[in-house]
Image (cartoon, grey):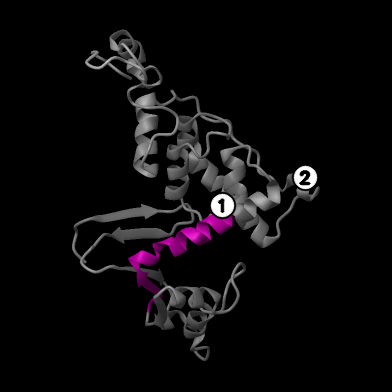
Amino acid sequence: MGGENIKTQTLANGMKVIVQEDHAIPNVAMYFFYKVGSRNEHPGATGVSHFFEHMMFNGAKKYGPKEFDRNMERNGGSNNAYTSNDVTVYTDWFPSSALELIDVYKRQAIAKAREEVGAFSSLHQLCEKVDLSAVNRRMIESLIKAGAMDSLEGTRSQKMAALDGAMESGQRAWRDRECGQEGLFGEMLAEHAEMPLPSVPDWADKEKLAGEKELLGFWVTGHPLDRYDDKISELATHDTSTLEGLAKGVEVRCV
């Protein structure tokens, strides 16, 4: 693999993610490497690594056996797995045109959490209730920049600055629930205490609008020319509501 267009990131759970963009073919390929193989097996207990390889196809908490596989194949994709001496690998590949399939799983994860708690009140609550194995940091960043989380507590800049801590807290909460860990008072201690949002300056309107345009293709909370309203009003002689009935040849400066 060449060194061009490679991005790396280590998630809070220790998983290292390596991404390389290559538009030579219209496919997306994902490889999951687990550092366990036949060399880790005890004498007389061989085949365990290969057994876990096959368990990868056996469904998960949210999806039944082969359900994910069928969805992949229905959209032109495929998957496989193999085990070697020191690694077990699970692979997925699918047409880039089917990337929307991944977005479907993300939307389902958020919708499921909304059904459980209703409207979210804070970034920390969202990260604790949404399945972060389906919704990653990049997606939450995009929602913040697009203004989709403006109803939650804090400014966009505060939520962006708090995102790492909120996701780490959310992952701890998910691990606790998966392990069945609860305090002496059960559900009363099930929620992790929320950290206060950091005190950081809000983004300038120009930066907010740039994020909306980048992610949505249009502006939502304003327009880049809004800051020139006073000057435009001074120069304009008419607006579009006063054009009807003007005499031919009248000079018009319109907004």
Q: Can residue 180 be seen?
A: yes
Mark 2 surroundings within 10 Å by alpha-carbon count, few (fewer than 14), some (14 through 19), many (20 or more)? few
In magenta, the rendered stretch is 86-109
Of residue 69 and residue 220, the one placed in the foreground of this image is 220
* Element type where label 2 sits in the image: helix
Q: x and y percent of residue 224 in the render?
A: 33, 26
Query: Who's the residue at 52% across and 61% down the image?
Result: 105
Among numbered discs 1 and 2, the one appearing first in the sequence: 1
Q: Could you say which disc has been placed on residue 171 in the image?
A: 1
Of residue 154 and residue 199, the one placed in the foreground of this image is 154
Q: x and y percent of residue 172 in the render?
A: 59, 51
Distance (Cα) linking label 1 and label 2: 19 Å
Q: x and y percent of residue 223 in the render?
A: 37, 27
Query: Who's the residue at 54% across and 30% down the image?
Result: 197
- Is residue 103 found inside the magenta-colored segment of the image? yes
Proximity of marks 1 and 2: CB atoms separated by less than 8 Å: no
Q: What's the residue type where badge 2 is placed?
A: Met
* Element type where label 1 sits in the image: helix
Q: What residue does disc 2 label?
A: 188
Q: What's the residue type where badge 1 is placed?
A: Gln
